[in-house]
Image (cartoon, grey):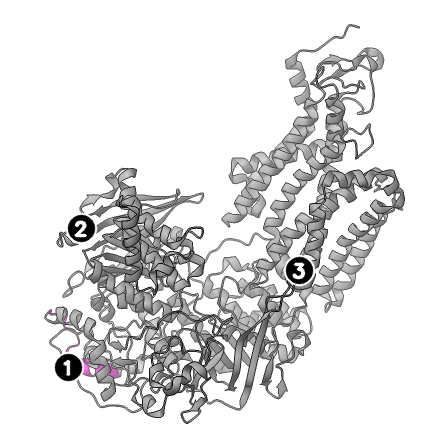
Amino acid sequence: MNEAVRNPEEPIIEIENLSISFFTRKGEIPAVMDFSCTVMPGEAMGIVGESGCGKSTVSLGIMRDLSNIGKIVGGRIKFRGRDMGDMSEEELRAIRGNKIAMIYQEPMASLNPAMKIGQQLMEVPLIHDKVSNDEAYKRARDMIASVKLPDPERIMRSYPHQLSGGQQQRIVIAMALLSKPALLLLDEPTTALDVTVEAGIVQLVKGLGKEFGTSMIFVSHNLGLILETCDRITVMYSGEAVETGKIKDVFDRMRHPYTQGLFRSIPLPGADKNERPLVAIPGQLPLPQDRPKGCNFGPRCHHFVEGVCNAAEIPMIPVDGHEGHFSRCVRFNEIDWAAMPPGAKKSSEPVKPGAPVLKVTDMRKYYNVGGGGMFGGGAGRTVKANETISFMARESETVAIVGESGCGKSTLAKVLLGLETASAGSVTLGNDEIQSTGIENRSVGTVSAIQMVFQNPFDTLNPSHSVGSQIIRTLEKFKVGKNTAERRQRMLELLDLVKLPRAFAERKPRQLSGGQKQRIGVARAFSGAAKVVVADEPVSALDVSVQAAVTELLMDIQRKNKTTMLFISHDLSVVRYIADRVVVMYLGHIVEQGTTDQIFAPPYHPYTEALLSAIPIADTSVVKKHIVLEGDIPSAMNPPSGCPFQTRCRYKSLVPDNLCETQLPPLKDLGNGHASLCWLADDVLAEMEPVISFDRDHAAHEGEPEDVVPHRERSVPGGDPGFAAPPPKRPRGKRAAPAAGRLGDAAEEAESRGRTRRQETRDESGGQKAGAPRRTENSTVAPFKQAEAGSGRQAVDPDAPSAFEPTEKENGKPRRK
Amino acid sequence: MNLEFVGATQIVLGILARFWPVWLSLAIVLGASYFYRKKLGLYGQLFSTGVGIAGLAICFFWLFTAIFASRIATFDPLAQVAVLKNAMPGAIAPETSGGGVYLLGGDNLARDVFSRMVFGSQIVLIIAPAATLFALMVGITLGLPAGYYGGRIDALLSFLANLVLAFPVILLFYLLVTPAIVEMGIPRWMAGVFFLFPIVFFLTLFWTRFKNRPDRIWLYMGLTIVIGGWIYASLVFNADPFRILSLTPNQLNIFAAVVFASSPGVFRIVRGLTMDIKTRDYVAAAQTRGESPWYIMLWEILPNARGPLIVDACLRIGYTTILLGTLGYFGLGLAPESPDWGTAIKDASRLLRSFIHPALPPTIALMSFVLGLNLLADSLREQSMKD
């Protein structure tokens, strides 16, 4: 049926030296330059890069759906051998949505809110295949079933707003698949969704190639997602593809400094905040109009050589020994890929947590909704946003609060900060009970003692006031300094603290990049003598390379000031990296809490287990158990009876007497402060297997040429927190890990089950001889060497203004004093 | 009665020549703005599109016409030259009455249509922006708490706003000028309340920001009270000790009526914007450092609502101009001999079948000014979205 399968030899889409420019009032802005890629039938190509690198423009260019200011200025896009540039508007229309379908980030925006799902789906076969109404209905219903949505008949009758985000995105995918496209373009399809929902969508997308023979181009900023879904990857930077190749080749033996920088700045298993901190990429993405000559990454690259890298434009250069692996780096054969960047700081001492600073005991927060208003009759309902929250945070400690949207973590933050008052229970900060003191009644000391770093960098600063005046105002409120001059001095010192130039004081927030804004947010939070800082997903909206820099900065200041940090996040890989203790929340309840090691190792709470399995990890040697939760998070307006997680729990059948559905489970003490809200018996918990484990064989000679003797090393006790086994050593590339370890039995079992897909890819490339057998003899020693040099962050400030700092003069009004 | 006329070319050239101060000022202002447009922020960006330039040019044209009215006009707007009753454009006034040309003819009372149109711009350009400004103050001061607090305050204020909006505007105006009601002092009371808002607004504005800064707070508060009090006394009680500002009872009526009718619109816009902006993180950041609600409303939320408010103000000046015209047309507003455009259109409309020329200039003036404001608002909206 699908044309794609007919001729497996012919590429579905061939992009040759594509260049796209936008023509604005500032002149021509090249968005994509010299981009080439080929996608074969059934193949999935991942395009990864940070914001502004042109990855979405490529996908829009394929659809020829550039807005009126965008134009393809060079190169060709061939769809099944035909140049799309030669096609008429009518032919293009016949291809769009039919042969090439696109899935966007925001599912609600892709569905017509005024039409029922059924109608919208039926439109596709009605228009493209001119089938009868009944046939269209049948196809739509079958497609809903095949994207694994329950009760297709009911969904056909629903309007988009009646479905959850995850269900909507499945409908969008179903709609795209209904026309049996040869090529599916996915532009960040899961970014707007929660992790556990994302895991379900990823599993669905992964099967598409096999089931429907559809080729895919998967645009994402998340390397882990690309690893899970794609066969090949193209890394883009500043409008160019900088590296492309098979997933395995690029992930294990990257040959472009930018790709390596990306891997070093994400918290992969093996990173540790004390011993092996993240390494951020210095500088920031150049603006399109002032890209440097030669290598675009040159100014941020520590392998940069004057006269070589900036001599001429660099073509894609094939990498020896890997089929289809190209890099846009002239020096990749000369670079020591295992070396850490110069000036890296030594690892720091783990911090000793001190006395308890913040204590939350049995705190509850209920909201009354509905009713009220002048004409609002009727009694309101109660939303239980927080139920029996109890935890404690000590001085210098980082406590992570983990959960998906609607779990009550933001409400918790509001109560702590005094924006809301608790309905019951107590919150003790130092020696003061603050649970029922609203912010307006708190003393200056209390207000400045508990501060917050906000999530969205574009929202955290008031766009109307200059950066300096916003910090000065905070100082004024906290009664720091006697007069304006002193506060001004203190403000400049705070800018130094967050490693921003003092000139930024006069700038308006819009002249700052996301990372810089977030730094100002950090400076503001620490401007009084903050004892507790609540960081609400402080880096989740930032680009990967900037994330690392801001995370490190936050931890540096925390370490210096002995501040307690409550780190709110849904991203368990960051949490594992940064936190000392973890609190997992679900629907207003704390379902599990304990030290990071306890949380990341079995026994798990069933929800924690699912969360762990849902994080995409950009590491080919990691083997995960795949647990996909059924359904969506229930609404807090209408929580399920009994255990909050019972509607999605896969262990429910193991609990006798239907206890899960009828009674709230007790908080089970698992020893050493590890507690879990679950009915499961001890023997079931004891049998749980680790979710994430390492395929050490693979990791040990990751990216190595085949003639290297595999090495087996002694096991070192106390590896990475929480994993079944310590992280493997990686001779090259991503991260130098000092310890290698032996896998536990349980891990091995889990691994053998979960490994299948990647095993295949590994076997394919097994026979090839990787070129340049450098460092073959000493490869067994190498890891230890790297360990010495391999920790610490860069001395160069990663997010500090580079040559590409926007230099536009402030043209606003004079600063208010 | 034989009248002498000048030709069409001479009329056109004559009018263009009379406007020379306007052309000169336009050239200087637009030229300078265009030259420095890169440094002028949003205002400078208006010069990047034809629509923006056109809007600005038209608005500036009427602004300068109002400023230089006495220099441009050929006759006193109230002077009558009996022979030129309903004279066609280009009629030459007899030597006995001082000479000169009725460039756009004479109206039913033998006054110069051109001069009346020019002087009419003064009235429109003073009352419309000023009334809009007061409406803006009232709308902002009530809209901010409604949007910020929500709940009962919002329900009450929104209900009142809806009540005003639901009341037929023309009927309202009829009521406000009814002698019985004027005698009761209702318009004066209303004006007294409305004109209090700007003073309250600025006092709160400075108090919330500078209450811990004794070096500034008293200066600002003092200035506000002195200047505000002076304007308040002159406008509401017509008791300006310096005899600079004054407002006739008729003008006060119009002022009160226009502010009353247009502030609910501003209120709703500000309320909506506030509801949106209060969810931003920087508002939460201000709350978590212990700022008072009014500080947050006036210093954190209001500056970020300015874009839509400026656009709305532009459009609203246009509505107010039309409203003034409507009022004039119904004879509700200003004195019957007033040269404002609305009254002029009303006067001319009676004889529309016989003489169309007295009706055209004020109509075109009104239309072009509102068009200019709308173009300006359009362009402002577009440019502010691009940022």
Residue A375 badge: 3
Expressed as whole percent of the image width and height from the top left, the position of residue A291 reads: 36, 54
As drawn, the residue found furthest toward the top would be B2
Disc nearest the viewer among 1 and 2: 2
Residue A3 badge: 2
Q: Does any portion of residue A191 appear in the rendered image?
A: no
Label 3 and label 1: CA atoms lie apart by 76 Å
Instruction: Judge whether residue B334 is colored magenta.
Output: no
Expressed as whole percent of the image width and height from the top left, the position of residue B206 reads: 73, 61
Element on which disc 1 rests: loop
Expressed as whole percent of the image width and height from the top left, the position of residue A349 reads: 41, 87
Q: How dense is the environment of label 2, judged by Cα within 10 Å: few (below 14), some, or many (20 and up)?
A: some
Residue B196 as seen in the image, left or right of residue A30: right
In-front residue for pair B354/A629: A629
In-front residue for pair A481/B123: B123
Contact between labelled residues 2 and 3, with CB atoms less than 8 Å apart: no
State the residue at coordinates (84%, 42%).
B244
**Relative to B104, residue A65 above or below:** below
Instruction: Judge whether residue A778 is colored magenta.
Output: yes
Tag 3: amino acid? Phe
- Disc 2 sits on a residue from what chain? A
- Disc 1 sits on a residue from what chain? A
Residue A710 badge: 1
Q: How dense is the environment of label 3, judged by Cα within 10 Å: few (below 14), some, or many (20 and up)?
A: few
Disc nearest the viewer among 3 and 2: 3
Disc nearer the start of the sequence (1/2)? 2
In-front residue for pair A428/A513: A428
- Disc 3 sits on a residue from what chain? A
What's the magenta region?
A768-784
State the residue at coordinates (52%, 48%).
B385
Expressed as whole percent of the image width and height from the top left, the position of residue A392 reads: 51, 87
